[in-house]
Image (cartoon, helix red, strand yellow):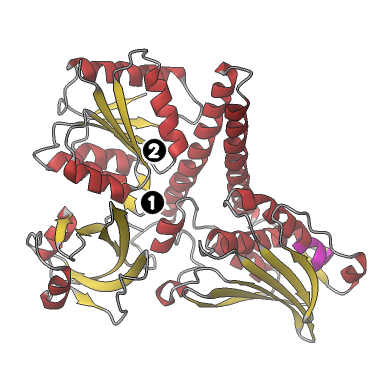
Amino acid sequence: MDHHYGLIILDGNDQIIFSSPLVRQKLYRNIRGLNIKKVLDTNSFIKLSSEKVDLKNHQWCYLRLNLTDNNMEAIPCECIIRRFDKTNDLRFSILVFPVFQEHKQNKISPEQEMKQYSQNIFHDLNEYLFTISSEISKLKEMNRDDYKTFQESIEIMDKNIEGLSFLIGNLSTYAQISKQLNKRKTNLYEVIEKACNSIIQTTKEHNIEKLDFKIFENGEEKFKCEEPRKTLLVNNKNRLNFQVYCDSDFLQRVFINLLVNALKYSRDQKPPTIRIDLNNETNGYIIKINDNGIGIRKVDQKNIFQRGFRSPIAFVQDCNGSGLGLAISKEIVELHNGKITFDSKKGEYTEFKITLPK
Amino acid sequence: MRKMKILIIDDNTTHSKILMEEIYKIGSPNYDFVIISDGIKAFDILQNDYSYDLIFIDIKLHGIDGLQIAKYIKREPDSKNTFVIVFSSSVSEEDIHKAKEIGVDGYISKPSQKSEEVFEEIRRLVKGVKKGKIKSQRGFKIYG
């Protein structure tokens, strides 16, 4: 995605106090001092979509509009309108993102694409490493008796190492994905158990204090976890029912990616509720992973499995991410002759459904 | 002696603190730091306060591209003489090129291992800006 955002900042009375050069350029004029609603209503260059803007009750919301460029071609854009407080004075800002478009043929070569990914990944790796190495040198220099600083440093490093290992996990899967799968008869529970345990450990990275996590088998509750960082141990007798012919390392990565997303895109005010449903059906195993997170917007739904796609929402919610997770997951499921689909409602839930042959 | 005002805009506050601690190592107490992790709040602050002597800014910020903020600072008559340094993990040529076009004064890549040399260079830069030896708009320099 191209990172040219327009920006409009409004004061508490919806008057524009700032518009960025990109917006001014698109509108051919300075709109400072004008009322935003008037600008949006009267300006033929901007066409609002039907999505309503409810500024009063939300920290941020979205609208879609068309900006016209110099050649009078309409560029579909998405805006994030974000509210922030400043000494009780409400202000809003609008960020404009060009809508993510599928890579057009001839437009971007695989080499360029690869370069972009590696730059993204380099950025994230560097951020983690810089933090960790700085904390280490701080520890080396510090007063040995300062327990509080010591504890803080360890925690920062811990968080960053978790982020780092997640990224490296995805990268290593990505690097090997074309390689032949090492398929073996495996119990699906084992795979899910490993994935869940590694996720429950990372709740710290996402600052999650409370969690509502359940596993159901054919509609019957088999496991429950409310305390983050508790280890999941599935009863042995359950293990017999779900034999899959798979590469367990790869499949585990799929569940890790889906669960990490469920945690990452949870809603701030609610503890994450994650429900895994395992169903043994005649035509295969069906695994559903359901969360009560922020959901996936309709406009993003067709893009989420594309490599490198990141929704503008991800920008607001969380900055890091390579845009590889779901693309990899889909590839892996398909290599197992399975299918992955999802259903989601913005602001309510997301449910991924994986079907694996027996 | 007037304190030097330094603004650090980085969504990773750990990084801002590291930078601040490293600059404090100069030893003189004459530095005032403002650390902001939210790019949009940075916009708000910059609308009302032009008194910064030096601004460090990251590119990848929550919700906004730091280069947009840098561009704004360098365009507004009241703030265009402020010394602006991009401090980022990005090594993309495109970003460096954009930073140069915008007219920022320098670019520092965040080292992946904390490197004394890079911070020594930053301290030299801060001292230079403070004494007025290094002025803004003398050209673009890649540090570190």
Q: Chain of mark 1?
A: B
The quarter in which the N terminus of chain A is drawn is bottom left
Question: Which label belongs to residue B91?
Answer: 2
**Apparent side of residue A153 relative to residue B81 in the rendered image (left or right):** right
Tell me what residue is drawn at x 59 percent, y 19 percent.
Answer: A140
Of the two numbered discs 2 and 1 on the same chain, state the one appearing first in sequence. 1
Total numbered labels placed on residues in the image: 2
Q: Tell me the amino acid under the disc marked 1.
A: His
Q: Is residue B5 above or below residue A347?
A: above
Mark 2 or 1, closer to the camera = 1
B144 and A200: which is toward the camera: A200
Q: Return the residue found at the far top.
A: B27
Q: Chain of mark 2?
A: B
- The residues colored magenta run A185-192
Q: Return the residue found at the far bottom.
A: A282
Residue beneath disc 1: B62
Tell me what residue is drawn at x 57 percent, y 18 percent.
Answer: A142
Q: Decide: few, some or many residues near mark 2? Use Cα within 10 Å; few <14, some 14-19, many ≥20.
A: some
Q: Tell me the amino acid under the disc marked 2.
A: Val
Q: Which quadrant of the view contains residue A228?
A: bottom right
Q: Decide: few, some or many residues near mark 1? Use Cα within 10 Å; few <14, some 14-19, many ≥20.
A: many
